[in-house]
Image: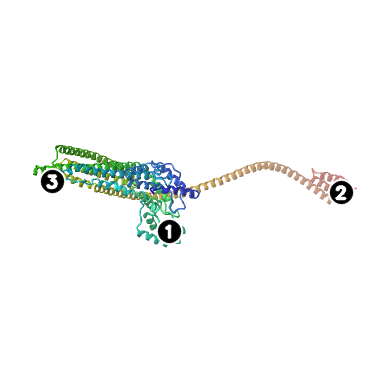
Amino acid sequence: MSLLRDVGRRRRRIRSALTKATATTAMMTASAVLVGLIQSSPVAAATEPEQDDLTQYRNSIGADRRLDRCKGAQALRIGGPLLKAKAIEGLAGTEAELDHVLGGDLDWWLDSPLDVAADADEDAGGVYANAVRDRDAALSLANQVYAKHDAGGHRLDWLAPEFGDGLWNFTIRTQREMAKHLDDDTLSKASPEALARAKAVAEENRGKDEWHDWASRSMLSDSQVGWSSRTSTDIASYLKRGGFPTVSPVKDSPEYRVEVEDLKQAWAACDYANPYDPSRKLNELVMAAMVEWELEYAGQADQRAAIMRAEAEASAATREATDDLVEALGQAWLAEQLLRWRKNWQDALATMPDYPGRPTQAEYDRATADLARYRANVAALATSAKAQAAKATAAAQKATTAQQQAWAVADTTHVPRGRGLMYAQQSVQVARASAAAATAAAKATETARAAADATVATSDALLAKAKTESAALTTEFRRVAAEEAAAQAKAAADSAEANATAATESANTAKAARTTAEQKRDKAKTAADTAASERAKAEAEKATAVASRTKAASERAKAKAAEDKAAAQQITATGAGTAAGTATADATAKRKLADEKAKAAQTAREKATAALRAKQATAARAAALEAAATAAAGSAAATETRAAATSRPW
């Protein structure tokens, strides 16, 4: 039973139980956004937002999804026809379909669909190996009919060459060897020197942070194996920082963007895990990188699927073409043997006409019929090989076209060429290399046809040439694969350089725009300050005007009051003047009366004086009283005075 199991599924169950209550709202929100983006991709399926497993030293969100892709890619890379087809089914399908192909929805002791396909490939390989051996044995038996009745010194071969060995080694044996690594991880490995430096850094940091100490022990442990082990990416990050992250990088800073790009590059190369980050200082950066990566990956889904299917088509056609070649070599060998048999007997009978055991005419006729049949078989196989080579070439062109389309998408979105294709880049290499091998097989098959159709003088040489050409299939495959890999690397480098140049130009443009904006801002600020000053001045003037208007209104009110008071006083004064006039007239009359009374009093006094002088006391008294009465005229006293004046004292 295969050891390939989706341990990620079990981790997800444990993680769900441990961390649902502790995952932060921010991370859940970011995860939900990420899931929403992924669900828009044809390779995704509906799923609940992931939660970070806070018991781990890495942020766990998104890691299982990327791990599944890398496992599927491993099966695609090493698989035979059936395993390759099953891997393509998962990688080109939804996230749930990929999980199913990997066995994520099965109990751990059951074989996954990949396991079943790998076993079926191995069985099919065994059947093919047996068929190759049977075919070689059939060649020997067919030739032994003539070999046991041969003549001359250059007799026929008793056993046929093992023509299928080369193909079997190239396909079945290689496939079986590679299938043993189905469960192997493809993570990058840190060098011993880098690990030694990382351990030294960990010792220097020992005691500063207990949680970090535990994390470094885990990361640097020698017991790490499989898909959960550390990577060269982890060690490089640790060395670059001098430990684990202790501060969060400033968002959108140059350092932040470099780390985002480094993460996406690592994930594309199947260092699938998030970075070691015990304190979760990189959460925002990791989520930003994940969103960008999932968009990039989803954006080239159609091209990846087309390339993988093209690889499968090219591989199948190449296998058919090489099988045609192997069988054609065998048929051409039989033809060459028959030509030699006829030549041997021709030479023997020419030298010794009574050579014993000479063939009968029926044997000659059978040989002629067999030779014609072998030649016809080779011709048909050459035609078939040519058709299979054409299929492989067409499939390779599909892969190349899809790759060009993916590159166009990458250029449009300003990401490196090939990164979003991931494993499909190698599929392009395989498709093109397979087409080259199929073409070489078709060429060698055509040479075998020429050998079968040749005369005995040239047949042996042509057959030898065909064998040599068949041996070159592996070389041709590797040559074209290497060429394509180099071309892909150059395309990635060129696009990276172009993106870097564009980024630099964009940064310069942004800097210039920022400078211009800052200048405009300064001008605007100056204008704003001036306007504010003018506005303050205007406000002050307005306040002064308001105060002046208020004061003027107050003064007007005071003036009005004064005016009203003056008018009232004028009215009062007018009345007083009238009264004064009346009083004056009365006073004048009273003065006149008083003058008259004074004159009368004066007269009375004079009379009193005279009376006194005449000693006329009575008369004087009466005169005095009369004077007093006259002075008091108009009053009650006047009456009394007169009464006294006229009365007698006796």
Closer-to-camera residue (101/208): 101
- Few, some or many C-alpha atoms within 10 Å of disc 1 (few <14, some 14-19, many ≥20)? few
Label of residue 618 in the image: 2
Specify whether residue 223 is in view.
yes
- Few, some or many C-alpha atoms within 10 Å of disc 2 (few <14, some 14-19, many ≥20)? some
Of the numbered discs 3 and 1, the one sitting upstream in the chain is: 3
Can you give x and y, in whole percent of width and height, for residue 393 in the image?
Answer: 26, 41
For the residue marked with disc 2, what is the amino acid?
Thr
Specify whether residue 414 is in view.
no
Closer-to-camera residue (284/35): 35
Q: Closer to the observer: label 1 or label 2?
A: 1
For the residue marked with disc 3, what is the amino acid?
Gly
Of the numbered discs 1 and 2, the one sitting upstream in the chain is: 1
Label of residue 152 in the image: 3
Can you give x and y, in whole percent of width and height, for residue 300 in the image?
Answer: 35, 43
> Label 2 to label 3, Cα distance in Å?
227 Å
> Label 1 to label 2, Cα distance in Å?
159 Å
Residue at image mark 1: 217
Label of residue 109 in the image: none
Can you give x and y, in whole percent of width and height, for residue 554 in the image?
Answer: 58, 45
For the residue marked with disc 1, what is the amino acid?
Arg
SS at mark 2 in the image: helix
SS at mark 1 in the image: helix
Can you give x and y, in whole percent of width and height, for residue 232 in the image?
Answer: 36, 55
SS at mark 3 in the image: loop
